Amino acid sequence: MMENRVKKRLFLGLALGALLVTAVFISVFWYLTKTNAAFLNRLLVIAGWAAVVLGVCSLAGIALMVISLFYSRSLGVFRNFAFRMLDMVYPLALGLAKTLRLDRDLVRRSYVEVHNQATKFCLAGRRLKRPMILAPHCLQWSDCPYKITIDINNCRRCGRCPVDRLISLRDRFGAKLAIVTGGTLAREEIENYRPDAVLAIACERDLISGIQDVKPLSVIGVLNDRPNGPCHNTQVDFNEVEWALRQLVVKPGISPVVPVSFSESAD
Ligand code: SF4
């Protein structure tokens, strides 16, 4: 009880402090623009240049991404920069899609495709030692009594839900498999296992927030299918999962797939 009260005070105190700081900033800004027109002009120029620099960086990041996809090349030393710029532009693209009344899930899927392809090229030729498969709990059959989120080995392999096949893939590819109930647990699993790349299965929103959350860790995303509605007895395309795993894991007897070029895969 006491602990809760402290937490509330902390937030309320910080919120009031933030409001106070904002009010001081606005007052100073208002005073300076009222008494000094040159200051306002200078401020507008600085804001304009900041927007230009951000715009040029975003454009450069997207251009690097397009070149990487088109020529099937790794982003090399520009990897982090290009991915950051992609993430920066993503909410703008989503906002534009909303304005144009486009299906935002289509935009999200397209982002995942771009991100996946670029990640695959960056990982090409790398021998990963600790690949990980992260899958959502909603893949488990809803009436299954076994607690697989605590220990995946509690699964009895009855074949009623996709978890059975995921375990087979885990064993075949030598990857760590974790079934998680949300983003917090997913982060915890990643922190504990410290994988060198992750194959994540999730819906559009969770996948993108997860991908952005764990950067700079390489994540290849596979979207789940929701034939029974969201978060209930979901499915996943195993051809896609296996294909993605082949990108991550180079093992004797399991040949890596040659990356598909942008022109072949882009819609
Ligand atoms: S495969 Fe069977 S035992 Fe395993 S999680 Fe699915 S329903 Fe449960």
Image (cartoon, rainbow, N blue to C red):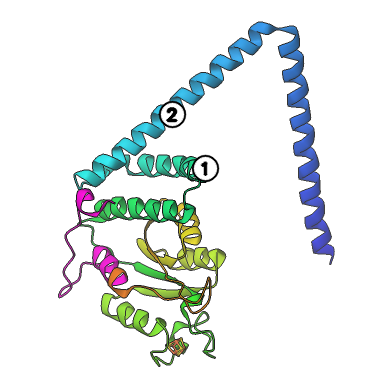
1 is higher (above) or lower (below) than 90? below
**Between 57 and 170, which is closer to the camera in this rendering?**
57
* Residue 40 screen position, x and y as percent: 65, 12
**Between 158 and 172, which is closer to the camera in this rendering?**
158
Q: Which residue is drawn at 52% across and 45% down?
A: 98
Q: Mark 1 points at which residue?
A: 95
User: Does residue 13 belong to the magenta stretch?
Assistant: no
- Please tell me in which quadrant of the rendered image residue 258 appears: bottom left
188 is higher (above) or lower (below) than 89? below
**Between 197 and 65, which is closer to the camera in this rendering?**
65
Tell me, for residue 38, which label it has, or none. Answer: none
Q: Label 1 CB, ligand 1: below 8 Å?
A: no
Kind of residue at badge 2: Gly
Q: Give the range drawn in magenta.
A: 241-267
Q: Residue at x 42, y 89 (%)?
A: 160
Q: Is mark 2 on a helix, strand or loop?
A: helix
Q: What element carries label 1?
A: helix
